[in-house]
Amino acid sequence: MASPERPPRSRSVVRAVRLWRPAAAGVSAALAGLGSAELAAALLAPAGSPILAVGALVIDLVPAWVKELVIGLFGTGDKAVLIICVALGAVVLAAAAGILELRRPPFGRVLVVAAGGLAVVAVLTRANSATFDALPSVIAMVVGAVMLTVLVTRLPRTSATASAAASGPDRRRFLAWTGASAGLGLLAVIGGQLVSAGTRATDAARALFDLPAPATPALPIPAGADLNVEGLSPVITPNLDFYRIDTALQVPRIDPESWTLRVTGMVEKEVELTFADLLALPLEESTTTLTCVSNPVGGDLIGNATWLGYPIRLLLARAKPLPGADMVLSRSQDGWTASTPLEILTDDRNAILAVGMNGVPLPLEHGYPVRMVVPGLYGYVSATKWVVELNVTRFDRETAYWTDRGWSERGPVKLSSRIDVPRSNTRAAVGPITVAGVAWSQHVGIRSVQVQVDEGPWNVATLAEAISADTWRQWSWQWTATNGRHILRVRATDAEGLVQTSVVRDVIPDGATGLADIAVTVG
Ligand SMILES: Nc1nc2c(c(=O)[nH]1)N[C@H]1C(S)=C(S)[C@@H](COP(=O)(O)O)O[C@H]1N2
Ligand SMILES: [Mo]
C-alpha cells in the first residue's frame, strides 16, 4: 500500500527541527538532573541546592551597579528575577549541550560536567558549607550527563525526504523519552520545593525568635578561666566549632509554633508545654561541658557552652513522678531516645530544657527549638535534641536508642584530660615551650593536672580558674624542651581525689579511659 509522500519541507524548517530536537533533549536532561539535585538537597543537604548556590554566587559576583539596577527595577522581586535569570541561563546552556552532543560528541556532556563543576564551586564557596553539600550538584551532573546521552542517541534520524511512516515511531519514542525525563525532573523540582518549604519556615522562625532574657543569668566567666594560650581550646566553644553527634541524616525541622513537650508515664499528672509556655517560665543560664561517650582519649567530641533553659526538676515536680519510677525516657521528634536516671533529673544540678546556646537560639543541628542538657552524663543518656517527650518510667521496663545497641545503661562522664598544644607530631625548638590543654570531670570538678615527659616524674600544671564543677578546666605547664623525640602525657585528678587511670579501655560500652599523649621532636 503506497503511502502519500509528504511535500518536501523547506531548508530553514528542516534546520529549525534539527536544532529543536537536540536542544529539547538537552533541556530535558538538565531538568532531570536539576530535579534529582533539588530533591537530594531538600532531603539530605539543605545548603546544597545548585540553583540557589549559583544564584548566591551570582549575587556575590555581579557588580554593585547591576544589583542596584535590578533592585531599582524589580524591588523585592529581585531574588525572583535572579532565579529566573539563572534558570534561563541553565536552559540556554542545556539547549547548547544538546546540540553539541549531537554534532560534536562528547562536548555536550563536557558542557554538562562543566556546569556541574561550577555548581560544586558555588556550593562549596558558601559560608559554612560542608563537603557533603556538594552531593546534589554531583548528582545533577551525573544524571544530566547520562540523560543527555540517552536522549541524544534516541533522536529520530530526520531527513527532509524521510516518510512520515519511517520517522513516526522514532519520533514518538524520542518525544516520549524527552517528555518523561522533563516531566519527572519538573516533578522532582516541585517535590524538592515542597519539602524544603518546611525547612525555610523553621529557619525563618528561628531567625525571628528573640531569646528571652534569663531570670537567673549564668555566673560570669572568671577572667582567669581562659589562659589565652595560642592553639588551646577556648573555654567557651563557639557554636560553629561545637562538635555535632546525632543519628539524624536530615536535621529535624520543627516549627516552634507546633512544638509541644509532654511529660508522660509514671506521673500523678501528665503535663503538656508549648514553646510559648516554656519561654514564659523563668529561664536560667548555666555553663555546662557536653561530652560524647564515643570521644576517644585525646579526642575532640567535647564542647563547653552557656545554655539558657528551664530546670527539668521543676517540670517533673509539676508532674509528680510516682513511687517506683527510676528513669526518664526522653524522646526526640525523630524518634531517638535517651534513658536518664530520674534521680539525676531531680537533684539540684543544672539539668535543663535548653532553648539557647551561647546567647542565640539553639542552632538547628544542636536541637532547635528545645534540647536537654544534663551536667555529668554523656550525651547519649541525657542530651536529647529536638526533644518532644519525657516519659517517666523504669529502667527494667524501657530501653533507649544506644542502650539497645550495646552501650551501657548508665553513662556518667569519666574523668579525662587532653593536650591541645603543642600539636602532636610537630617539631619544636630547644628551650621553654608552653604545654596546655583541658581536663574535665563534669559535676565533680578538677582538682589538679599533671604532665609527664617520657617516663619521668609527674609535673604539676597550672590550672585556669574553674567556672564550675560542670565545666572543663584549662591547664598549662612550662616545659624546658631538650633535644630529641619526646612523649608528653597528661593526667587529671578530680575534686574527690580520684586520679585518672592509665588503664586503656575502648569507648564502648561506657566511655574510653587511658591517658592522652603527644609526640614532639625537639631540635
Ligand atoms: N535527637 C537526638 N539527640 C541526641 C542524639 C541523637 O542522635 N539524636 N545524640 C546524642 C549524643 S550521642 C550526643 S554526644 C549529643 C551531642 O550533642 P551536640 O550534637 O549538640 O554536640 O547529643 C545527644 N542527643
Ligand atoms: Mo554521643
Image (spheres, rainbow, N blue to C red):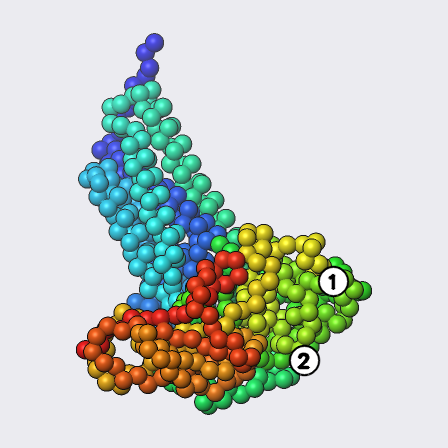
Residue 389 versus residue 138: which sits nearer the camera? Answer: 389
What is the x, y in percent for residue 133? 39, 57
**Is residue 156 something one can see in this rendering?**
yes
Query: Pointer 2: what residue?
Result: 282
Q: Quadrant of the N terminus?
A: top left
The amino acid type, in three-letter code, at marker 1 is: Ala
Circle 1/circle 2 CB separation < 8 Å: no
- The secondary structure type at the circle numbered 1 is loop
Residue ID at (35%, 70%)? 517
Mark 1 and mark 2 lie on one chain; the one further toward the N terminus is: 2
The disc placed on residue 79 is none
Please identify the quarter of the rendering in which residue 337 is found: bottom right
Q: Residues within 10 Å of mark 1 (few under 14, many from 20)?
A: some
The amino acid type, in three-letter code, at marker 2 is: Pro
Residue 468 versus residue 96: which sits nearer the camera? Answer: 468
The disc placed on residue 325 is 1
Residue ID at (48%, 87%)? 465
What is the x, y in percent for residue 412? 57, 67
**Is residue 251 something one can see in this rendering?**
no
Please identify the quarter of the rendering in which residue 168 is found: top left
What is the x, y in percent for residue 437? 39, 78
Q: How far, Cα to Cα, is label 1 from label 2?
A: 27 Å
What is the x, y in percent for residue 163? 29, 21
